[in-house]
Amino acid sequence: MKKILCFVFMIIVLSLYSTCVYADCTTEEINSLKKETEKIKITYKHLGEVTREDGSINYNDFLVTAKNIPNDVYVHLYPMTDSNFTLKDDSLQIVLTSGNWVYNLYSSKCDDIINEINVHIPTFNIYSLDPLCDGVDENLFKLCGKYYEYSVSREDFERRVNQYHLIHNINNSSSLPEDKNNNIFDSVLRFIRDYLVYFIILFGVIFIIFGISFYLKKRKNKNVLE
């Protein structure tokens, strides 16, 4: 009798468990859901200077918004993040840092993965805040652009930006002192070179006037003596 009761109990437990398991989505259902997820639009907004809880300053936080998420779809973000999701109607907002993220989209009907969206969050360029970038066109000189993906040393940045200033004749008070002095010296030399002929004529006229004055004065003194 006990064996029969145990068997009946196992049957009941298994039947209850089977009712809680999701059924597999058909190919048509998955394709239909996938088509709906293609309407999802992801945008991001740079949050600027952000002070962390430990007091450090960060410039690589972005508010990322995913819109048009279907009702039967939920999101799993990879890599995992400790940030909190903010759900509002069909939108999902979360703060992410620079890097590559994957939005894995699952169906709540059958717990199957429907689609994935790869998102690249750019890296903020700290050099774009530098006074050396004043007056520099970021479209022509990427090191002064708001976003830059590569690591550049301070020395290399200063060398390249000052070279850009020289080529494009940009006067920047934040340039290095030796470069500023060199620019002044070059300007003086250029001025003298451009107006050299006029300087020669001017000195020539002054010399002639001085010579005539000296001659007339000498002659006048001679007449007085006579």
Image: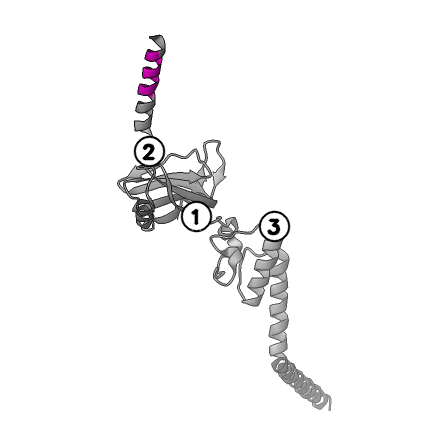
For disc 2, the marked residue is: 22
Residue 215, x across and y down, in percent? 69, 87
Placement of the C terminus among the 4 image quadrants: bottom right
The disc, 3 or 2, on the residue closer to the chain's N-terminal end is 2
Label 1 vs 2, first from the N-terminus: 2
Residue range in magenta is 4-13
Q: Is residue 188 left or right of residue 64?
A: right
Taking the magenta stretch, the answer to whether it contains residue 115 is no
Look at mark 3 in the image and give the residue it sits on. 153
Task: Tell me the residue at 54%/67% (across/down).
Answer: 168
- Residue visible at 44% across and 35% down? 81
Q: Are marks 1 and 3 in contact (CB under 8 Å)?
A: no
**Disc ID at residue 118:** 1
Q: What is the tally of numbered marks visible in this picture?
A: 3
Q: Main secondary structure of the magenta part?
A: helix
In percent of width and height, residue 220 lies at: 68, 88
From the image, state whether disc 1 or disc 3 is nearer to you: 1
Residue at the far top in the pictured view: 1
State whether residue 137 is above or below residue 47. below
Q: Amino acid at mark 2?
A: Tyr
Residue 9 sits inside the magenta stretch: yes
Residue 8 falls in image quadrant = top left
Q: Earlier in the sequence, mark 1 or mark 3?
A: 1
Q: Position of residue 5 (x, y in %)?
A: 32, 12
In what quadrant of the picture does the N terminus appear?
A: top left
Task: Return the residue nearer the eye: 34 or 29.
Answer: 29
Question: How far apart are the alpha carbons under marks 3 and 2?
Answer: 54 Å
